[in-house]
Image: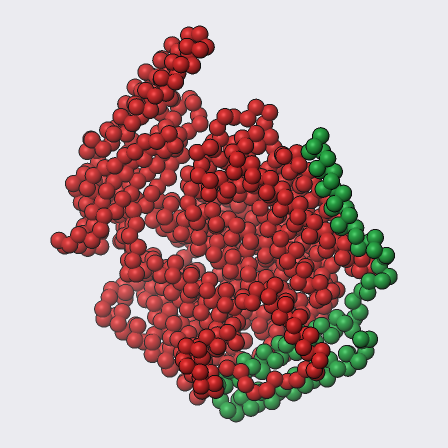
Chain colours: A red, B green
Amino acid sequence: MALIGRALLILGLLVCLYGIAASVYGARSGRQDFVVSGRRAVYALAALMTAAFAILEAAFLRSDFSFNVVAAHSSTTTPTFYKGAAVWSSQEGSLLLWVWLLSLWSSLVLVLTRKRVREIVPYATAVLLGFGGFFTSLTVFFANPFGTSATPPPEGAGLDPLLLHPSMMIHPPMLYSGYTLLTIPFAFAIGALITGRLGGDWLAVTRRFALGAWLFLGIGIVLGARWSYTELGWGGYWAWDPVENAALMPWLCATAFIHSIMIQEKRGMLKVWNASLVLSSGVLAILGTFLVRSGILESIHAFGASTLGVPFVTLIAAMVASSVGLVIWRRERLRSEARLDSLLSREAVFLFQNMVLVAMVFVIFWVTFFPLISEAITGTKVSVGPPAFRPFIVPLALVLVALAGIGPIIAWRRVTAANLTRSFSFPVASAALTLTVLLIASDASARPLALAMFVLGAFVLGTVTQELWRGTAARRAMTHDPLPVAFVQLVRRNRRRYGGYIVHAGLAALLIGVAASSSFQHSRDVSLQPGQSARVDGLTIRYVRATASATAQKISFGALLSVSQGRRHLMTLVTSRGYYPAQDASLGPIGRFFNGASDSNVGLSAGAWHDIWTVIHPDLTPLQPLISQGDRVFQSAMAAEASLPAAQARQGLGRLWQFRDIAISEITTRFVTHPWPVEFLLIVSPLVTWIWVGAIIIAIGGLIALWPFPMFAWRRVRAVSRAKRAAPPRVPARETA
Amino acid sequence: MIEFLIVLAILLLVIAFVSAPLRRGGGAHMQAPSSSASQLEELEAAREAKYREIRDAELDHRTGKLSDEDYQAIDGSLRAEAVEILRELDRIGERIPS
């Protein structure tokens, strides 16, 4: 099957090359048959990549270790769910996933645009196939997922234990969906610029794909943060890691685009800005993929050093050069059709918000790449961490939240002072009340930036509540529906607007959680023996007893912790650290079980007000003499067995492995029976739950704004257009809410 | 050998599928989009956007974000712009053979 898989990749590459040529020729010559043939090349690519991905997936599921990637990233003991997802834990498999998703999304957009933007589509097809060809060629020439070994190992190396987490299995497909979806607006923007068709129609086609990309990227980012919080054992959810930033930058850029696109739709303004944002989002999506794949910046998420740097840099350079060149070439046609009527208008707020978002992207880009820039200039790689981001990002985030509150309550075009006062009264009162309560009843004043975020968050929540209430009331006054019905109808008839408002509410909740948990976190590194306790933020955390377990796949050392407040027992937490056997036999027959990869099992109690987060860092030094002694004993026993005749040696080794398992079990039991001191990280962090709740609210708002999905929207458009053919269009009557 | 035959079959299928439009009788029968059709499409997008703008202005008025005077002025100009788009659509529609 590996041969078929490899042949599918080569066929896919040839199909891409043909499709690019056919699409461009069809567009230049006006030959629609070639255009259609080019479009079919995309569908063929999707079929080929689906088959290739299915072959690789099947190899993982049946633990076929003749496939090199399966042997390196899975094992017979890997749970089936993780076997299925282990495909994208490898460089080769993740590149195949990328091109597979790209081919699926490309096919979807081309099905939906069979009768639309027909001048632009051939060029967009060529660009999409260009991306497809690039990633397929990487799998053909640089990272072959179908490489095989003539002598497959009896057992695979297994999946990196850090990836044995449910969110890690969904996180990569979400991010890749986001990245690949962002190439669609990019491709259509290139097509629009080449043809000079820079009206609103191509924006209407790609808007949902941009929104989909934004949604998927957002979900991927949050799942990554959740994994970091519950799996990595450092107690945080965001480390400003280059790979995290690589996903955040296109997300911020897409956020700016989703807002500014409305100004172009309504006013014909900001055409250069929108084209630049779409093109930048596409470039940043490829840059994000490059950062994960190349290993040029150190990251826990990256695949390590690879040979993919040069092809990626070449692609990014080509994208940037063609984008800049096309925008300059079409600058006359990209002129705005209108001017801002007033600085007190929603379009002005959107513009300001766009500038803040782009400034954030610029800061993140600069600080992320600073180590490379410093190395290029001075020859020394300067490492920068989270403190380098905060002085810029925190104030910008505050302004962003303020604008997320102002935007919904300000009208398009212009507003009067009286309306402004009326619209701002309730949100400002909410913010003022929050400020007063926090100043009186908490120590929030000690952290002014966090306090500002709480107040602005309350302002946004006040804004959204007011808008939902006023909209529902207006709808109810018109239709006399019951309140819940009026509310549902209001949102249903204005999905973009109210979906967006819900996203703003989610953003406020999320950033309140971030501000609270990062500013008011109580954290202690303590060394405890069983029976001892430590106090964190008024809570007493007692190390009750040690726990240990040993299986063929994993040795685990843990602790049972009792959490109490005063004399009241609140909960019991269990934390452990797992050690996975290394494949390296030189670490010793016993030692390799204690020196392989390891992961943390966090003891977590999550609540609406605070999370109690604990992790154990067991010190294995006291066990080391026993491990070394075991290695010596078993090595000499193995040497003695090896000198016997083959049949006897096999039998003897079988017995020896039984003794080895007993020895490992005895060593792990020592951890429980001897009261050695153990290191713990104990954290009490307020409002962390609101980060995840906020993210869920954002996703719900995004889904509302995205609905109906392109397929259903297309059917609806067809139905509407059929109906319109029967009757001439009319300006809508005055009835909306 | 079986694998080779499977690959060959896939190759033939792909060639047949991708080249089907070329084998169906040439490009002369398949109309390329005219500039009028493209203009029509752009205007239809502009019309939908204008309708949405009119609805948004009305919702802004109903929810108290626009005063009566501002709403009358904005709505009037939006409707005039919409009528202009509809006239343009009619003009181009007449040029396109049905």
Look at the picture and state if A261 lies above or below A48.
below
Quadrant in the picture for residue A136: top right
Instruction: Identify the residue at image location x=69%, y=74%.
Output: A722
Q: Position of residue A718 (x, y in %)?
A: 66, 70
Residue A36 visible in the shown view: yes
Q: Position of residue A407 (x, y in %)?
A: 47, 75
Q: Position of residue A4 (x, y in %)?
A: 66, 36
Q: Position of residue A634 (x, y in %)?
A: 35, 17
Quadrant in the picture for residue A29: bottom right
**Image quadrant in which the N terminus of chain A is located:** top right
Look at the picture and state if A85 lies above or below A126.
above
Q: A19 or A270, which is in the foreground?
A: A19
Instruction: Identify the residue at image location x=48%, y=74%.
Output: A491
Instruction: Identify the residue at image location x=29%, y=35%.
Output: A557
| A382 to the left or right of A208 | left
Look at the picture and state if A718 lies above or below A581.
below
Q: Tally the numbered discs.
A: 0
| A188 to the left or right of A736 | right
Look at the picture and state if A432 lies above or below B79.
above
Instruction: Identify the residue at image location x=57%, y=64%.
Output: A709
Residue A375 visible in the shown view: no
